[in-house]
Image (cartoon, rainbow, N blue to C red):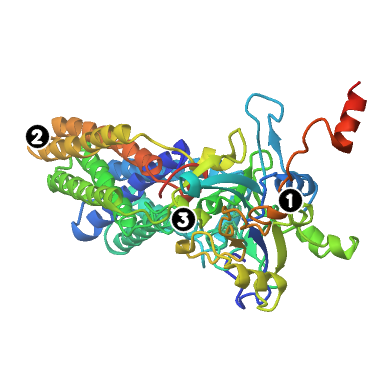
Amino acid sequence: MTSLPLNPPKKKLGLVIDLDTCVGCHACAVNCKEWNTGGHSAPLTDLEPYGESPLGVWFNRVHTFEAGDGAEGRTVHFPKSCLHCDEPACVTVCPTGASYKREEDGIVLVNPDTCIGCKLCSWACPYGAREYDYIDGVMKKCTMCIDRIYNENLEEQDRVPVCVSTCPASARHFGDLGDPNSEVSQLVRERGGYDLMPEMGMQPVNKYLPPRPAKRGAGDTGAPASLPDHEPGPVEAAGSGFLAWVDRTLSR
Amino acid sequence: MNPAYSVIFFTTASGAGYGLLIWLGVAAVFFDMPAHRWFGFAAFAVALALITVGLLASTLHLGHPERAWRGLTQWRSSWLSREGVVAVLTFIPAGLAAIGWVLLTRNGGVWAWLGAAAAILAVVTVFCTAMIYQSLRAIPRWNTPWVAPVYLAFALASGALLFHFGVRAFGLGLAWSGWAAATLTAAAWAVKLIYWSRIDGAAARSTAESATGLGHLGKVRLFEAPHTGDNYLMREMGYKIARKHARRLRIIALILGGALPVVLAAGATQLPDLAAAFVAAIAVISAGAGLLVERWLFFAEAVHTISLYYGTDAA
Ligand code: SF4
Ligand code: SF4
């Protein structure tokens, strides 16, 4: 059914991405490719992987932006994948019903058996979250690792999207953003989490946490601004004292 | 947006086909046009062929053409699905009206009503096609109320030019069809000029700042793309056309698609049938070329918000 669920999902599984701590290592993107090329929407086809201009399906890509100028400028690493929107145009434009939003958890998926590969959903998504598979002739996208998060064969702590478990900087958090008391919702409240391009009206579920204010002054990091207690004492005059004797002895 | 030839061809060809269908209906209902068998045969054949070829072209660009029927199921929410449903429905009254006109040489009474039904469904189909584009918020330049009027106006104008050529080629007189074609073509370009001036003057709806949410830190610039190669998104949606080229192409489209056909169609009203048919044919060819350029620009000039993540400042 391409219409949105009649009862808007109460549970909204999504990601909270911390732009302050992301170090831009691309581990999430690589592990996403690794897991999903064998997962629900497998394979994530590559064209010419070792050729002149390789091209392939990725569900998650890490962009890097500069914001501001001069001393105030920041470099911000910016991972982006499907935001599993509450009002996803990618779903309502689909002529076949292949693109759908799940009522039980808000996850947006594509049914590869009914997709005709018209690509209209990728035009409708403002965020560039959908990727066409030229070989399979169908649209593919982030599944929120639907084949991990409910997978009872995995250890409890592994039932999270693979981008979240792999992030070495813990910049990615997974949870129910429909529950105001969940850890992710609290995080969004505390850190001022925001929507990308709210003017598009898609009401994304995934949130981004802004970089914290820059700490540039000496002492802003919690370390002492200067080290008065550790100033070196007066240098002993050469030729006398124990250290001078050691130095002379060892230099012989 | 990448100007894909199949889509450009589809929208222009089927637009002209639906336009011709509309004029056949209008002529039968309002102008008591005599049901000339061979004119009817040629006109319905051209209209239905343009529509069918256009639909086939757009079906073939699907990843799974054999599943195309599934595209008819989601008419409740999807303009693309609605377009498909109405396009298929249009064939029923259009085919019946063609039978009446060609086999029975009748286009009055119930046959006129079938022609009218085909004309109305043709208008609805073109409207649905336009709404596919107009409803996409991610492409701000399409998401304006002027897209549907442009598509409808060009369908009516190109249909009128075809109709005019047909009646003159079959020596049916009906000089009013030349005036109608000239007026509608001029009107269609007036609508298009409004569309162009609107999209040129429109303030950016989204920016690199709103796309990243980093505007509070200052101007946002792409520092490193996610990968060194190309990707599907950039191929399909990252197409950029230089402003200078766009300007030139707009002028070419306006002359070929607008000025020439208007002058030719109006001039043809003053000529005897054979000469008029010749001039009307040139008008059709010129308008077709102009419309293809216009449709190419419609895609090439449209900036998708995805490009904000790949180094574009505003969309
Ligand atoms: S990010 Fe794009 S693909 Fe994902 S739900 Fe939103 S509109 Fe759809
Ligand atoms: S490409 Fe597939 S999922 Fe996307 S709109 Fe077309 S049919 Fe639906």
Q: Nearer the viewer, residue A251 or B239?
A: A251
Residue at which label 3 appears: B215
Residue at which label 2 appears: B271
Residue at x 62% of width, y 37% of height: B227
Determine the CA span between mark 2 and mark 1: 105 Å
Residue A163 visible somewhere in the drawing = yes
Residue at which label 1 appears: A230
Q: What is the number of callouts on the image?
A: 3
**Chain name for mark 2:** B
Q: Nearer the viewer, residue B265 or B29?
A: B265
Marks 1 and 3: which is nearer the front? 1
Residue B36 visible somewhere in the drawing = no
Amino acid type, callout 2:
Leu
Name the outermost residue toward the front.
A240
**Chain name for mark 3:** B
- B191 sits to left or right of B310: left
Estimate the x, y position of residue B135 in percent, counting from the top left. 42, 59
Establish whether ligand 1 lies closer than 8 Å to the Cβ of label 3. Answer: no
The answer to whether residue B306 is above or below residue B3 is below
